[in-house]
């Protein structure tokens, strides 16, 4: 279970203060598939970064009672100047996983072949997404935080992700930030709509989607 | 307690992984690889030693000039690199903070450790080579040499923990970091022994843990040829005070650090 208690987040640049989240409260249960909806700049990525522990809330706290992936998105988690293999080795080391298994899994899941010997900064966003998913799936977290990124993949990759998350790992929790109403409708059992720094949880996904579409 | 030892194990694992990563990114795997780490201090100390020899003769107060310069410049290079690399170190390594077990202080400890290892390798290498040319003494007291180095390294670490968060807080500090190196040179005991200075200056220099460290190292190397002046309790006290300030600042800056 992961619980957010009254999360507030402000960003300060010079003398301009922007408050992105104004008291967000909710709980992710094991097995939950939560769709996170909101307009651009509503704070979806910020919320995911706070839950992932990348950034700290201005006030409030996140209590994690299950293992939780780093936010899987376009950036972060990689060292651009290192190759795919070196990144895999680094992640295997810090998460204390045997590298040999990691390597096999990454090769098979990403299908990147020889490109795994290239620095990650030369990857396209789709290739990066493949690598990020492969690495985090190899570690087997109880909860996955996904920021948009499924959308950049090609057909084959999307199918793979669907299989990995909705067949093989049915028992895991998922927080999925997305603009694709279709994806959320298809895979989620609850939805959160983020507006004006406040998160509202809808137990019924269709209600959540109609609220989001009316924004 | 088990919580603590578990955390410690995780941090050691993280630091080891970061260290390998750092060595690979900075030096690559080709040609001499991570041995590059000692090339710069060696070249620097070697050239300065050569210039000094021509300017001031081979010996100064009975000490080989080259050995004196090498024993001072290699720690100074270590200090310079460590300070220089502390600027914006949290931001430049931000991508790694996506993994929760990676802490901002790991970056500092890893950078300083790598620089320290490089400096030690350079020191030993230079010492051995110069020893065969009869320009470097056999260390007189290894314990003093090592404990002086330890004091020196610990103080550099503690200053880095202050510089790193300050450089994130203000652009001005970030730009001033390189200057901090030059400011510290007179207080680092590189160019002279405290014994060669007037008593009141010497007294003032005892406030610098760098001088204490350097004097101990020089005594460990040259033995009775030099008269060392040092104040170990003061050095440790200042280092600890600096560390407390640094850790507090780092903790505060972590809360507002924003990474994309």
Image (tube, grey):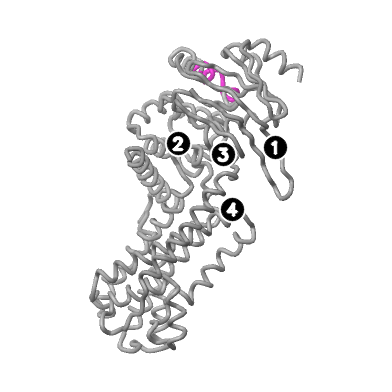
Q: Which mark is residue A19?
A: 1
Q: Is residue B217 magenta?
A: no
Instruction: Tell me the quarter of the image containing the C terminus of chain B.
Output: top right
Q: Nearer the viewer, residue A100 or B190?
A: B190
Label 1's element? strand
- Label 3 close to label 2 by CB (< 8 Å): no
Dot 1, how many residues are within 10 Å of its Cα: few (below 14), some (14-19), or many (20+)? some
Q: Earlier in the sequence, mark 1 or mark 3?
A: 1
Chain letter, disc 2 residue: A
Helix or strand or loop: what does disc 4 sit on?
A: helix
Location of residue A177 with respect to B52 vertically, above or below: above
In space, the residues marked 1 and 3 are separated at their CA atoms by 14 Å
Question: Label 2, label 1: how many angstroms apart (C-alpha)?
Answer: 37 Å
Numbered disc 3: secondary structure = loop
User: What residue is shown with label 3?
Assistant: A56
For label 4, the residue is B168
């Amino acid at each position: 279970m992961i619980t957010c208690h009254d999360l507030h987040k402000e960003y300060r640049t010079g003398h301009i203060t922007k408050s992105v989240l104004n008291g967000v409260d909710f709980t992710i249960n094991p097995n939950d598939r939560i769709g996170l909806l909101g307009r651009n700049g509503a704070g979806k990525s910020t919320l995911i970064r706070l839950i992932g522990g990348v950034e700290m809330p201005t006030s409030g706290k996140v209590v994690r009672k299950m293992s939780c992936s780093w936010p899987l998105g376009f950036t972060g988690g990689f060292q651009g100047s290192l190759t795919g293999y070196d990144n895999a080795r680094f992640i295997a080391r810090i998460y204390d996983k045997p590298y040999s298994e990691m390597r096999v899994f990454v090769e098979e899941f990403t299908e990147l072949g020889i490109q795994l010997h290239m620095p990650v900064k030369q990857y396209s966003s789709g290739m990066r997404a493949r690598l990020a998913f492969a690495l985090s799936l190899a570690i087997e977290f109880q909860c996955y935080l996904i920021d948009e990124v499924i959308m950049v993949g090609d057909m084959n990759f999307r199918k793979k992700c669907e299989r990995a998350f909705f067949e093989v790992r049915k028992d895991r929790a998922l927080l999925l930030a997305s603009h694709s109403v279709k994806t959320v409708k298809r895979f989620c059992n609850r939805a959160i709509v983020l507006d004006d720094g406040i998160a509202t949880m809808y137990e019924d996904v269709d209600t959540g989607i109609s609220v989001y579409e009316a924004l | 307690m088990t919580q603590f030892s578990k955390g410690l194990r995780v941090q050691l694992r993280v630091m080891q992984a970061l260290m390998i990563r750092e060595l690979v990114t900075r030096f690559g795997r080709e040609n001499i690889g991570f041995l590059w780490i000692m090339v710069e201090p060696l070249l620097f100390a070697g050239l300065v030693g050569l210039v000094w020899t021509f300017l001031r003769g081979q010996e100064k107060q009975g000490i080989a000039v080259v050995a004196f310069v090498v024993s001072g410049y290699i720690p100074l290079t270590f200090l310079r690199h460590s300070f220089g690399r502390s600027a914006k170190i949290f931001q430049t390594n931000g991508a790694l903070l996506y993994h929760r077990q990676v802490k901002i202080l790991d970056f500092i400890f890893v950078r300083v450790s790598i620089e320290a290892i490089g400096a030690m390798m350079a020191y030993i290498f230079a010492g051995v080579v110069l020893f065969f040319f009869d320009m470097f003494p056999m260390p007189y007291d290894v314990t003093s040499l090592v404990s002086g180095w330890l004091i020196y390294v610990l103080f550099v670490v503690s200053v880095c923990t202050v510089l790193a968060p300050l450089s994130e807080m203000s652009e001005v500090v970030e730009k001033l970091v390189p200057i901090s190196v030059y400011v510290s040179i007179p207080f680092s005991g590189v160019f002279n022994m405290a014994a060669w200075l007037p008593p009141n200056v010497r007294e003032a220099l005892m406030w610098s843990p760098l001088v204490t460290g350097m004097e101990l190292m020089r005594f460990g190397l040259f033995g009775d040829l030099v008269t060392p002046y040092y104040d170990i309790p003061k050095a440790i006290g200042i280092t600890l005070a600096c560390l407390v300030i640094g850790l507090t600042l780092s903790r505060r800056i972590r809360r507002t650090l924003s990474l994309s």
